[in-house]
Amino acid sequence: MKKKTVWLLAFVFLFFSVLAPYASAQGAVKKPKLNVKKLNMTLGNNFRLRVYNLKKKHTVTYTSSNTAVVSVNSKAARGKTATVNALSTGSATVHVTVRRGKKLIRRLKCRVQVTPVAFSIKFPKRAVRMKLSDRFHLDPIIKPNTSSEQPIFESDNPAIASVSAHGVVTALSLGKTTITATLLSSGFTAKCTIEVRLPRQDEEEKTEKPSRTEKPSYYEMRQEKKSLDDKKKYGIS
């Protein structure tokens, strides 16, 4: 009877020791957090700031450390979201406070940098030659260089060369296409022609080179000379 009791207690202890970490993980409370902690904006633009993991009785308030640079407006119920507006160039911090009644739950913040709107864009090269499967990063020159505005990239023929959102071009098939980078704020564009060609080694294989005639060895030359001397000596024509 005692042995059965000991085994039962051991089983119960093992059972709860296995379930305890799982239960604690399941019961862990997710803390409120922002969708972004750092934000780069261009003058005149806005961004939707959002707080996740809010409970039913949580309320959120937003304040800007520099209202001349950034303003924050929240029209959502309980302040779940807020609109950040870039008013002038500079930096500011949006402070977010989560409360339940008068009890402070958590303080959050988002650092915002506001830069000028870009007024010029161009590529360092107007044309680029690539080999099949190669990749090339098209890095446009944007003015002013203090602007954080990012252009939208587009390929006229993605079957020949595709381009990523960050300007990385991938050569997919032979031919030519044009990559265009567009600034949404002004509509200004920059263009670069991409030509996908065969690799050099393939071109060399396509063009057959004439084979070189090997020179006779020294031994072969000696044997030939001896044969001629013997013919002259014995009068053999």
Image (spheres, rainbow, N blue to C red):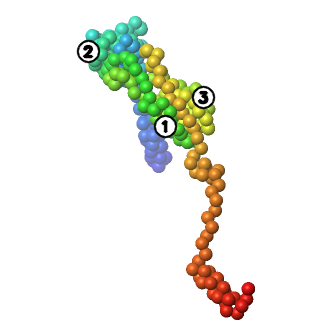
For the point 60% across and 52% down, the residue is: 204
Which three-letter amino acid code belongs to the residue tagged 3?
A: Asn
Question: Where residue 55 sits: x, y (%)?
Answer: 41, 16
Marks 2/1: CA–CA distance: 41 Å
Locate residue 121 relative to residue 214 in the image: left or right: left
User: Disc 2 marks which residue?
Assistant: 65
Residue 118: quarter of image: top left
- Identify which residue, 9 or 161, lies in the foreground: 161
Say which amino acid is labelled 2. Answer: Ser
Crowd band around label 2 with a 10 angstrom C-alpha radius: few (<14), some (14–19), many (20+): some
Q: Is tag 2's residue or tag 1's residue first in the polypeptide sequence?
A: 2
**Which mark sits nearer the N-terminus, 3 or 1?**
1
Q: Is residue 24 left or right of residue 180?
A: left
Tag 1 residue: 136
| Residue of label 3 | 157
| 10 Å crowding of disc 3: few (<14), some (14-19), many (20+) | some
Q: Nearer the viewer, mark 2 or mark 1?
A: 1
Q: Is residue 155 above or below residue 172?
A: above
| Mark closest to the chain's N terminus, 2 or 3 | 2
